[in-house]
Amino acid sequence: MDKIAKLNRRPKARSGSADSTDAGARPSRAEAEDAVRTLIRWAGDNPAREGLAGTPARVVRAYEEWFSGNFEDPQEYLRRTFEEVAGYDEIVLLRDIRFESHCEHHIAPIIGRVHIGYLPRDRVVGISKLVRLVDVYAKRLQVQEKMTAEIAKCLNIVLKPFGVGVVVEATHECMTTRGAHRPEVSMVTSCMLGSFRTRAETRNEFLSTINLKGVARRNNGD
Ligand SMILES: [Zn+2]
């Protein structure tokens, strides 16, 4: 239950908004469950019928898990966990970090993979920490482009590497199950900073290792 206790802390204001009143007070669990009942009625169903009786409580618990990243500060987390290493001067690359997020437009799942590469100056971070970093950003309402940039910037600020590259590939269920109904479409976003942006050689080494030639071509043009 520790995790849930932690959730009662007020989230830090996000997206550079200085207005701490923007999110409003966090509603009570009972209020959140009532809101789920309203949505069930909106869907044309009866929240009082037997099969749905426990649903509001389950949905609210699922939200605690899906959006737990709102209650954590990834920069602070990374600062506590990096290690100093001198002398390693090749790219550190972690490929295929699976993530599950939700789009901020429809609260529909975004499921995909993140690839992270960086060229350390003197600080590195363990594999599990990078996975955790992705999770903190994924477990928020997101836009894929923003999540890509946020992961790259966080690594850049805390590890101060020579360069960072982040590529995210994902499918958006708001596109596959509604609206455009395009199950075959996946979205690829990338953010290159430092030497990954300025040196084609570094960037291409990263992109060829994660095997995304399309992204390599696009980034060569800028
Ligand atoms: Zn959406």
Image (cartoon, grey):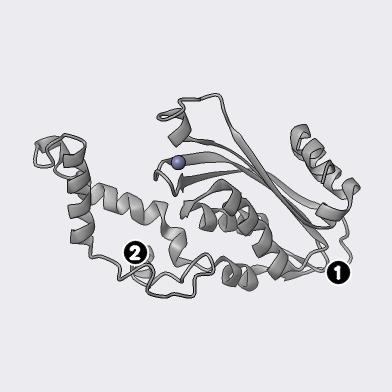
Callout 2 amino acid:
Ile
User: Which residue position holds label 1?
Assistant: 86
Residue drawn 46% across the image and 46% down it: 103
**Residue situated in front as seen by the camera: 193 or 139:** 193
Residue drawn 30% across the image and 53% down it: 61
Q: Residue 138's mark?
A: none
Spatial CA distance of label 1 from label 2 is 39 Å
Residue drawn 75% across the image and 33% down it: 214
Task: Give the answer, above or below, for where 170 lies relative to 33.
Answer: above
Q: Is residue 93 visible?
A: yes
Q: Is residue 138 left or right of residue 126?
A: left
- Where on the picture, by quarter, is residue 49? top left
Callout 1 secondary element: loop
Q: Is residue 119 visible?
A: no
Q: Where in the figure is residue 172, as x and y percent of width and height?
A: 50, 36
Circle 1 residues within 10 Å: few <14, some 14–19, many ≥20: few
Which of the four quarters of the rendered structure image does ligand 1 lie in? Answer: top left
Q: Residue 4's mark?
A: 2
**Which badge, 1 or 2, is on the more N-terminal residue?**
2
Callout 1 amino acid:
Ala
Q: Is residue 69 left or right of residue 113?
A: left
- Where on the picture, by quarter, is residue 106? top left
Q: Quadrant of the N terminus?
A: bottom left
Residue drawn 60% across the image and 36% down it: 187
Circle 2 residues within 10 Å: few <14, some 14–19, many ≥20: few
Q: Where in the figure is residue 5, as x and y percent of width and height?
A: 33, 69
Callout 2 secondary element: helix
Task: Give the answer, above or below, for where 144 lies relative to 155.
Answer: above
Q: Where in the figure is residue 64, as x and y percent of width and height?
A: 35, 56
